[in-house]
Image (cartoon, rainbow, N blue to C red):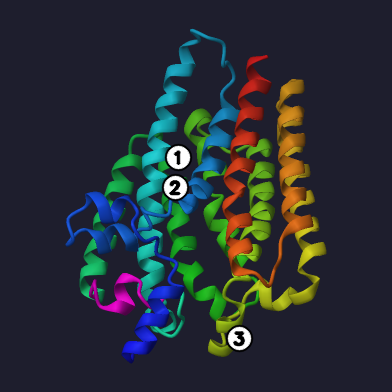
Amino acid sequence: MTETAKSEAVAASDIPKGAWVDKYLPARLRPYARIARFDRPIGTWLLLFPGWWSVSLATADWSPGASGVGQTLWFFVLFGIGAAVMRGAGCTFNDISDREFDAKVARTADRPIPSGAVSVRQAIFYLVALSLIGCLILIQFNPFAIGLGAASLLLVAVYPFMKRITHWPQFFLGLTFNWGALLGWAVVRGDVQAPALILYAGGIFWTLGYDTIYAHQDKEDDLILGVKSLALRLGAHTRPWLGVFYVAAVALVGLSGWLMHLSWPFYGALGLAALQAGWQVATVSINNPDDCLCKFKSNRLFGWLVLAGFILGQII
């Protein structure tokens, strides 16, 4: 890569400049924080929310002082740590798999592996270390949940290659990122029942929405490289499809709450989440990468609203 190309790549990079990684970490550790996306936590939130939703939905008694509340809060902590390290492991594996593609795209060319800051060998050792931490989290749960959590590794292994063979890699990301909707229920109740399965399906549609928006940032580069995505498949018809995805997500999340007989605050919070999703559909500019990134990140608010609904719907 020429010096001019390097300068253009740095200017277009999706790596935040002057973030806490630059301020507080030693130089030798910064590439590892970046490859795990610790400086970009939105992905961790999107991975974490389905697990938190499910734990909240499966908790029968949220009354102050109830015996199960302390355990539920501990599960929240474990899921938080687990989401951070497993998202980091997933990003590391994805970057190892996509290093040749990333080197050809301005937004990703200065990521640690294609830039040479981290070698493939070092990235593999880092991936193993993060995965071991994730395993330590997983074995804190019941045997059924441990087996269910381990099963998700198949999806994690397959997902990075889906954009090479299908225009629906966002669907496979949904299968992977929303596994917590099954795991959270299993952690609390030791099985998987209809509300968890429906919540899982709702989360998949949610991911189809937000990750299609995200994919519009890279559609020009993806077209050149031969990488597939829903952004390319849907093109100018993206907006109505986003509406379909988000309506299905809200309806299925609502059905999961209805099956658990949640009270009116759940539906109020879900209504606000629906408005937030509707705002995304109505205002997203699919040809403006900055706006696509903004709308993608706004899904953290959607996640918080649904979580608040599940908890308040149990308490009140």
Q: Which mark is residue 145?
A: 1
The residue that appears at 35% across and 58% down in the rendered structure is: 36
Residue at the far top in the pictured view? 65
The answer to whether the residues at label 1 and label 2 have Cβ atoms under 8 Å apart is: yes
Tell me which segment is drawn in magenta. 108-119
Where 166 sits versus 173, above or below?
A: below
Where 212 sits versus 263, above or below?
A: below
Nearer the observer: mark 3 or 1; the answer is 3
Nearer the observer: mark 3 or 2; the answer is 3
Q: Please, what secondary structure does the residue beneath circle 3 have?
A: helix
**Between 151 and 6, the one nearer to me in the picture:** 6
**Between 221 and 15, the one nearer to me in the picture:** 15
Assess whether residue 18 is covered by the magenta stretch. no
- Main SS of the magenta part reads loop
Q: Please, what secondary structure does the residue beneath circle 1 have?
A: helix
Q: Amino acid at mark 3?
A: Leu
N-terminal of the pair, mark 3 or mark 2, is 2
Q: How many marks?
A: 3
The image quadrant that residue 195 belongs to is top right
* Residue occupied by mark 3: 223
| Quadrant where the N terminus is found in the figure | bottom left
User: Horizontal placement of 8 versus 243: left or right?
Assistant: left
Q: Amino acid at mark 1?
A: Ala
Q: Which mark is residue 36?
A: none
* Residue 256 coordinates in the image, percent (x, y): 71, 36
The residue that appears at 23% across and 75% down in the rendered structure is: 119
| Quadrant where the C terminus is found in the figure | top right
* Residue occupied by mark 2: 149
